Amino acid sequence: MTELGVDVLLLSVGADLPYLTGYEAMPLERLTMLVLPRDGDATLVVPRLEAPRVQERPEVFSLLAWDETDDPVGLVAKLVGSAGVAAIGDTTWARFLVDLVALLPSTEWRKGSEVTGPIRARKDAAEIVALRRASAAADRVATQLQSGEIPLVGRTEHEVSLDLGRRLVAEGHAKVNFAIVAAGENAASPHHEPGARVIRAGEVVLCDFGGTMPDGYCSDITRCVWTGGDPSSEMRDLYTVLQDAQAQAVDAAVVGTPCEDVDGVARRLITEGGYGPQFIHRTGHGIGLEAHEDPYLVGGNCERLAPGHAFSIEPGIYLAGRTGARIEDIVVATEAGPESLNQVTHDLVVVDA
Ligand code: ZN
Ligand code: ZN
Ligand code: ZN
């Protein structure tokens, strides 16, 4: 905050608050807000009825509970006082920000992620252990997918999605964040919503799933399988290009490399393979308490990878209306080189129909 010239940090709904205090605000209409001045003590403003949820940590913050007829935004404005520059959590409800801006007309507003993003992006040893545990749990579900233990042919995408979700929980996740199942032509839509499409023999099934562990850290993995018989020549060709691009992008994720260069490696190889225009998203996103967070591996992000950065490497190739594939691992940048937290095979495994 000193470096950035921020006088006060305001955190509400989202992951920044639990990262700093251990308490997660309920994402409802009543205001919860940590007021953290650069100099001085922090106050956690909470609705009276939610105060019993808060594990008090007097060494971190003091608690200020507001009653149903109080004006919590006014309380926060009073605590902010004459602060010149306030940074407010990116996922704070707009209605609170709009009222705060009106009450504090001379305050300059910045995004909270300017303060918290770089801190949260670099994971410490305990966080890396937590991410390893999350990825290992996701890997166990991926192994069930690749071994044919999860029935595919004859079921709908939606049924398989629910099945993947149940397995994520059975393997240790506290909640499922997403379980994309995209069969055949639907694999051309990177964020396909699993639906009533019945999975047939002899096609690709793209599965991208992840959840949050009880300690708050997330998993995220994508694997594709082929449902019996030999993969089509179209799929074999694109998958060979994709698998090489994904592996080389992981190898390129060494400390000191600009984020955009890791994206550049995957993009160059996919372009050389003839599928440049069909790689329609960035190569990866950071991961931690949130499934998507800093740093983003995308053209234009010249931030350099540092030890403890944790992120996905997930290039994809999408042939609209026909087919598609994506391969995704979670990787941590370490002084000893990139460490892939997902260990299951990257091959297009053929599962018997
Ligand atoms: Zn995605
Ligand atoms: Zn994913
Ligand atoms: Zn991802």
Image (cartoon, rainbow, N blue to C red):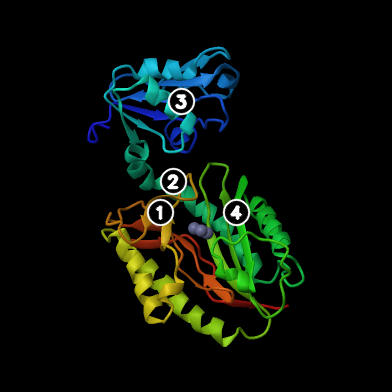
Identity, as a three-letter code, of the amino acid under mark 2 = Glu
Camera-nearest residue between 300 and 166: 300
Task: Residue under label 1, please give it.
Answer: 310
Mark 4 touches mark 2? (CB < 8 Å): no
Locate residue 262 relative to residue 93 in the image: left or right.
left
Camera-nearest residue between 41 and 84: 84
Task: Residue under label 4, please give it.
Answer: 178
- Asked if 186 appears above or below 74 in the picture, the reply is below
Task: Residue under label 2, please give it.
Answer: 127
- First in sequence, mark 3 or 1: give its number: 3
User: What separation in Å lies between label 1 and label 4 (alpha carbons)?
Assistant: 19 Å
Label 1: which secondary element: strand
- First in sequence, mark 1 or 4: give its number: 4
Residue 205 appearing in the image: no
User: What separation in Å lies between label 1 and label 2 (alpha carbons)?
Assistant: 10 Å
Identity, as a three-letter code, of the amino acid under mark 1 = Ala
Residue 11 sits in which quadrant?
A: top left
Task: Residue under label 3, please give it.
Answer: 33
- For label 2, the crowd category at 10 Å Cα-Cα, with few meaning under 14, some 14 to 19 and many 20 or more, is some
Which residue is found at the position 50% from the left and 62% from the top? 342
What x and y, as percent, mark residue 304? 27, 56
Mark 1 touches mark 2? (CB < 8 Å): yes
Identity, as a three-letter code, of the amino acid under mark 3 = Met
Outermost residue on the right side: it is 154
- Asked if 147 appears above or below 307 in the picture, the reply is below
Q: Is label 3 within 8 A of ligand 3 (CB to nearest ligand atom)? A: no
- First in sequence, mark 2 or 3: give its number: 3
- First in sequence, mark 1 or 2: give its number: 2
User: What separation in Å lies between label 3 and label 4 (alpha carbons)?
Assistant: 28 Å
Which of discs 3 and 1 lies nearer the camera? The answer is 3
